[in-house]
Image (cartoon, rainbow, N blue to C red):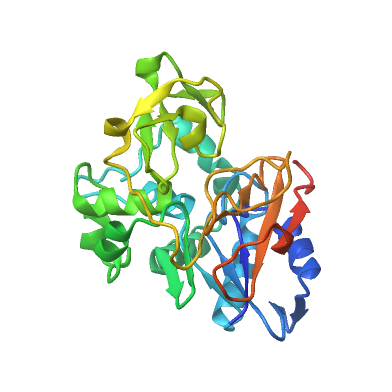
Amino acid sequence: MKFDIIGDIHGRFLTLERLLKKLGYAPDGGVWKHEKRRALFLGDYIDRGAQPRETLQLVRAMVDAGHAVAIMGNHELNAVAYHTLDSRGKPLREHNDQNQKQHRATLDAFSGCASEWAGWLEWFKGLPFFYEEPGLRAVHACWCEKSVERLRHHSLRDTDFLLRATEAETDEREALEMLLKGPEINISRFGLHVNAPGDRRRNEMRVKWWGYDAQSYALPEISMPPGAVLTEQRVQHSDVRHLPNLSAGGPPVFFGHYKMSCRNGFAPVDRGFCCLDYGAGSGGALVAYRWDGGPELEAGSFVAEPDADPGS
């Protein structure tokens, strides 16, 4: 099977249509399709952009017709938790200002459509946490073998599992957040922080989850996206030994989540590791990788569509 693997869409429906057209897909009976290929969507269909509803309709139609595979992103997980109550009647994801702001575009898009939105939340619950077949692996943020095996036979449609996966300090939560949000390290002890959306300061820095084979590392070497922290402050092996450390040489891994910069073009982040989140919904680009099989990843296989929807 040949796949066009597409990164985080974030409600950029018009950008997605243009990218699919560029990839050779065309609508047929209301469903976008390609005669010889399938799409593989890496999650984060909602929030930020103004058209999450249309985005979801397009993606689901392709999935239902067998023309695409869709996996879960952290924004779908967050939405489920935001709209699900625990045993005490409180939301699993707090309705604070920060979380409401992150979710606002989607809340606005489905205003007055409570029944339809409830149906989408059920669809989110059934999305797989990862995808694999011989020669290919895909996940939203981090391919951690331990977490993959922990979650292989689980779904958010299991209410007991959903509650365990959103509680603090459970194995289920640790595994799910590893796959959908990736590993982080605390950099506040270096007097550093990173800027998050909404001018929010975060003490945790997202880091890579492969290629740890030295005794110390400069922060730009391990940050995700690469080079995100400019200081050359070094961390020791003891600071990163608890992180996933996937070995190179297996089937390539495709993921999103990390909002790579378009400034220097598009290329794999490492041999066998390909990030496809380039900031759609935030003025970047929606990016696909044309995978025809085989372990080698090439810069020439990237296809990008600028994020130029109204409201960008």
Indicate the position of residue 4 as horizontal and vertical percent values: 64, 70
Quadrant in which residue 25 is drawn:
bottom right
Residue sitting at x 27%, y 43%: 90
| Whether residue 107 is visible | yes
Q: Which of the 4 quarters of the picture holds residue 123? A: bottom left
Q: Position of residue 122 (x, y in %)?
A: 41, 66
Between 123 and 213, the residue placed more toward the observer is 213
Residue 296 image position (x, y, % from top left):
59, 66
116 left or right, relative to 18: left
Question: Does residue 309 appear to the left or right of 170 in the view shown?
Answer: right
Position of residue 259 relative to residue 186, above or below, is below
Q: Quadrant of the C terminus?
A: top right
Establish if 66 lies above or below 171: below
Residue at image point 46% right, 21% down: 193
| Nearest to the observer: residue 230 or residue 218 | 218
Nearer to me, 264 or 105: 264
Which residue occupies the extreme front position in the image?
A: 214
At 66% from the left and 80% from the top, the residue drawn is: 37
Where 12 sits versus 228, above or below? Answer: below
| Residue that sits furthest to the top in the current view | 191
Q: Position of residue 270 (x, y in %)?
A: 55, 51
Note whether residue 127 is visible.
no
